[in-house]
């Protein structure tokens, strides 16, 4: 029992604190370089202790089954030329889906609850089937001879229905059209496309259309060219690298890649002591060098190896804006982003970096929500 005095309990004898980094064999990797604040600088370079990146399934061609959701508008059909080009070049199956919308006349409450009249439901089904038949005939008249199927999804939540159908048929890419900037775009992204992006277990290719909507049908005999310059933002994680295997099939054989890594700018600690400022500057320079070393390592490995790949490090406080600025300066034909989903909804996807890029990108965006690890 400790002796107590009027001054309080007796203090324990002082002992030195244990080392920040455990000694071997508990710590098998190299000790990180210390930076200001006493924390280790994150390693971006090649690490022999990391597990190898798992390539995407699919054999010689990643994309074997393409899914194109249509809403009956000409805007939605603008995704077809790109889908037909990719399907014809890779031999992939092409599936077109639309949701049966009840004919006008039913109450809003009845439509939302699914309890609409039989006549309204049957009329909506007939219209949707006729629309899919018309699109199929135009595709065949345009010269496409590949495997093509259509499916009418039941009325209800369109995003849930599209994702569920994609899983059932084994689709490995969803191709959709989004409207241009403004209220129309926000309405579209806030409903079907937004829900598909959040929940789809396969990549989603979003094609932007800045043209005014017209009644003229889309010419389905015209094929889209392959992407020549693709921007791939990376942050050093496996989730960000998960999309790399899925980019080359969309590119021109002579196309180029821009691997982008954005790091935060140096925030001075405000110390008047000159050596502190010098040390902070050196630490930030080491961080930039490590980021470049990481990007160059990715560029030298498959699937980037053998392609014209540029490693670019930018200093920017907002990663989303750095991606958009780079896309406008080049210009870039496609932005490919991978994000990790959290839970069943994947709230990380929209609301931060990916949200800014999707809503303001000047070009198509390929998004892949990497499932969260259990």
Image: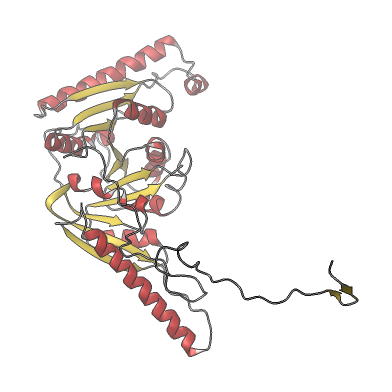
Q: Nearer the viewer, residue 13 or 324?
A: 13
Hey, which quadrant is residue 141 in on the image?
A: top left
Specify whether 1 is left or right of 40: right
Tell me residue 100's x, y (percent).
36, 21
> Relative to the observer, which residue lies in front, 353 or 3?
3
Residue 241 at x, y percent in the picture: 31, 52
Give the residue displayed 35% in from the left and 14% down from the top. Answer: 123
**Image point (32%, 60%), residue name:** 48
Q: Is residue 370 visible?
A: yes
Which quarter of the figure has residue 371? top left
Q: Nearer the viewer, residue 194 or 263?
A: 263
Which residue is depicted at the point 33% across and 25% down?
168
Q: Residue furthest right?
A: 6
* Residue 205: image location, x then y, percent: 28, 42
Q: Quadrant of the N terminus?
A: bottom right
Q: How many marks on residues? A: 0
Q: Position of residue 74 (x, y in %)?
A: 25, 33
Location of residue 72 with respect to 18 vertically, above or below: above
Is the residue 338 above or below the residue 308 in the image?
above
The quarter of the displayed image where residue 202 is located: top left
Kindly give the residue lying farthest to the top in the view shown.
118
Residue at 50% across / 68% down in the picture? 21
- Work out whether residue 328 can be spotted: no
Whether 33 is drawn above or below 199: the answer is: below
Rendering colour mode: secondary structure
């Amino acid at each position: 029992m400790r002796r107590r005095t009027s001054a309080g309990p007796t203090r324990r004898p002082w002992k030195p604190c244990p080392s920040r980094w455990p000694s071997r064999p508990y710590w098998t990797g190299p000790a990180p370089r210390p930076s200001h604040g006493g924390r280790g600088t994150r390693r971006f370079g090649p690490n022999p202790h990391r597990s190898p990146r798992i390539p995407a399934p699919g054999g010689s061609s990643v994309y074997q089954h393409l899914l194109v959701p249509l809403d009956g508008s000409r805007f939605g059909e603008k995704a077809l030329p790109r889908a037909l080009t990719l399907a014809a070049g890779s031999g992939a199956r092409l599936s077109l889906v639309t949701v049966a919308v009840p004919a006008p006349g039913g109450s809003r409450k009845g439509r939302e609850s699914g309890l609409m009249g039989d006549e309204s439901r049957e009329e909506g089904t007939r219209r949707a089937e006729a629309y899919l038949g018309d699109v199929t005939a135009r595709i065949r008249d345009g010269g496409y001879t590949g495997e093509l199927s259509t499916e009418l999804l039941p009325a209800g939540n369109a995003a849930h229905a599209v994702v569920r159908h994609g899983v059932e048929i084994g689709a490995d890419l969803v191709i959709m059209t989004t409207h241009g900037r403004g209220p129309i775009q926000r309405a579209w992204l806030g409903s079907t496309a937004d829900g598909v992006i959040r929940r789809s277990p396969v990549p989603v290719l979003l094609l932007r259309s800045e043209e005014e909507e017209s009644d003229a049908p889309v010419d389905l005999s015209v094929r889209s060219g392959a992407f020549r310059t693709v921007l791939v933002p990376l942050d050093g994680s496996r989730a960000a690298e998960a999309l790399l295997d899925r980019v080359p099939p969309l590119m021109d054989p002579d196309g180029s890649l821009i691997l982008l890594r954005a790091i935060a700018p140096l925030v001075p600690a405000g110390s008047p002591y000159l050596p502190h400022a010098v040390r902070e500057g050196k630490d930030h320079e080491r961080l930039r060098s490590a980021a470049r070393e990481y990007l160059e390592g990715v560029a030298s490995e498959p699937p980037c190896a053998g392609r014209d790949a540029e490693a670019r490090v930018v200093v920017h406080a907002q990663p989303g804006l750095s991606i958009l600025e780079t896309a406008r300066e080049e210009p870039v034909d496609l932005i490919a982003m991978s994000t990790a989903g959290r839970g069943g909804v994947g709230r990380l996807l929209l609301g931060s970096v990916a949200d800014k890029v999707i809503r303001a990108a000047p070009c198509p965006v390929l998004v892949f929500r990497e499932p969260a690890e259990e």
